[in-house]
């Protein structure tokens, strides 16, 4: 209990003032937890505030159009979170009369909610005594107890869950869970933690064995695939542009993009022209082709590295389905395309 008590005392003195910590309403807690998956608080907070302003209740989120949800999510990444968020809001509003499940097991049944998120909502909203185990918790426990089992192994994850559950004060689950995650985020950070100025400097086993910088152990690394995207910015005689929605499963599902030619490698402009001739876009009254970025844009995702170029194709005729740039701007795009659009004056292209 000394570990748990010390952690809670530290938290009460050092915690950040975050809006979702000032409520037991499961809706904002759920929203914050979904947003903060794979996302730092500093990055997620503006998105959380924007969502709460646009959708103050789960009914507001449920009634929103998917494009509006994705547009607000734009730049936060891992867009399946937004799609699952929207689907779950519809389920709660329609089938549960707007009431969130009030326990861990039932929360697990919701789309997009795994063990960690269910534990977080159950403890923060209902003070159910179930321990949270996320990346911060893995790091704190592995270092304090000098545990060098591979956390990417399912068996190890179960062992950490049992340990965290043993440490959890049954009557103060919410406070302890917040405390251990905050400690990992602010004090026991991944690289170069300030161990000298730490409440556990005399009791941390990893510090005593000089293993802080190698714990936790995680062996599995995501294989990164290179992809080469050549986007076609089709501009017709009226100054309008063409975009399309990405269909099918994928990281950018239901987001918009310019027509795309994907190649197996980075190709020359001459080879690009050969590729272009095999598409439907070359058959129209094509006036000129301009490469808009001489330097290839590199965009890193969790398991992909994208190499992106944008080619402007000007036509001497109206293109079916083209839209003014003012309308295109309202649509949700992958952030790398959005940033490119922001950095170029499309009205003068």
Image (cartoon, helix red, strand yellow):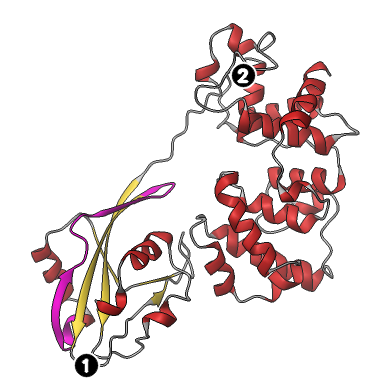
Q: Residues within 10 Å of mark 1 (few under 14, many from 20)?
A: some
Residue 113 left/right relative to 287: right
Q: Residue furthest left?
A: 270
Report the magenta residues as a range: 282-304
Identify the disc placed on residue 305: none
Where does label 1 land, which residue?
Answer: 317
N-terminal label among 1 and 2 = 2
Q: Residue furthest right?
A: 171
Residue drawn at point x = 64 percent, y = 57 percent: 48
Residue drawn at point x = 38 percent, y = 59 percent: 336
Query: Residue 212, position in %: x, y?
Result: 55, 16
Q: Is residue 288 magenta?
A: yes
Label 1 – label 2 distance at C-alpha: 66 Å
Q: Quarter of the image containing the N terminus? A: top right
Residue 201, located in which quarter of the rendered image? Answer: top right
Query: Residue 208, position in %: x, y?
Result: 60, 6
Where does label 2 land, which residue?
Answer: 143
Residue 19 versus residue 343 in the image, above or below: above
């Amino acid at each position: 209990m000394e570990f748990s008590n010390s952690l809670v005392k530290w938290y009460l003195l050092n915690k950040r003032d975050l809006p979702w910590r000032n409520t037991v309403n499961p809706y904002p807690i759920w929203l914050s937890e979904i947003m903060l998956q794979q996302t730092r608080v500093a990055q997620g907070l503006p998105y959380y505030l924007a969502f709460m302003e646009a959708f103050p209740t789960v009914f507001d989120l449920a009634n929103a159009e998917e494009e509006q949800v994705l547009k607000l999510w734009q730049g936060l990444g891992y867009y399946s979170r937004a799609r699952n968020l929207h689907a779950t809001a519809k389920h709660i509003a329609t089938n549960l009369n707007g009431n969130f499940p009030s326990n861990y097991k039932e929360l697990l049944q919701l789309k997009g909610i795994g063990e960690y998120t269910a534990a977080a909502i159950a403890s923060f909203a209902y003070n159910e005594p179930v321990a949270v185990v996320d990346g911060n918790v893995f790091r704190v426990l592995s270092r304090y107890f000098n545990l060098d089992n591979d956390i990417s192994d399912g068996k190890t994850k179960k062992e950490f869950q049992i340990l965290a559950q043993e440490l959890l004060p049954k009557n103060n689950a919410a406070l302890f869970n917040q405390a251990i995650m905050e400690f990992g985020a602010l004090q026991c950070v991944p690289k170069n933690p300030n161990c000298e100025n730490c409440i556990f400097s005399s009791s941390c086993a990893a510090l005593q064995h000089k293993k802080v910088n190698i714990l936790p152990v995680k062996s599995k690394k995501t294989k990164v695939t290179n992809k080469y995207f050549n986007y076609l910015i089709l501009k017709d005689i009226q100054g309008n542009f063409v975009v399309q929605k990405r269909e099918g499963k994928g990281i950018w599902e239901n987001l918009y993009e310019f027509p795309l030619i994907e190649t197996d490698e980075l190709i020359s402009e001459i080879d690009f022209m050969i590729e272009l001739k095999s598409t439907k876009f070359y058959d129209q009254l094509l006036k000129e082709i301009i490469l808009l970025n001489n330097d290839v844009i590199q965009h890193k995702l969790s398991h992909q590295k994208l190499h992106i170029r944008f080619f402007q194709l000007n036509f001497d005729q109206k293109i079916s389905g083209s839209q003014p740039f003012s309308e295109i701007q309202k649509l949700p795009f992958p952030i790398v395309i959005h940033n490119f659009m922001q950095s170029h004056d499309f009205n003068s292209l």
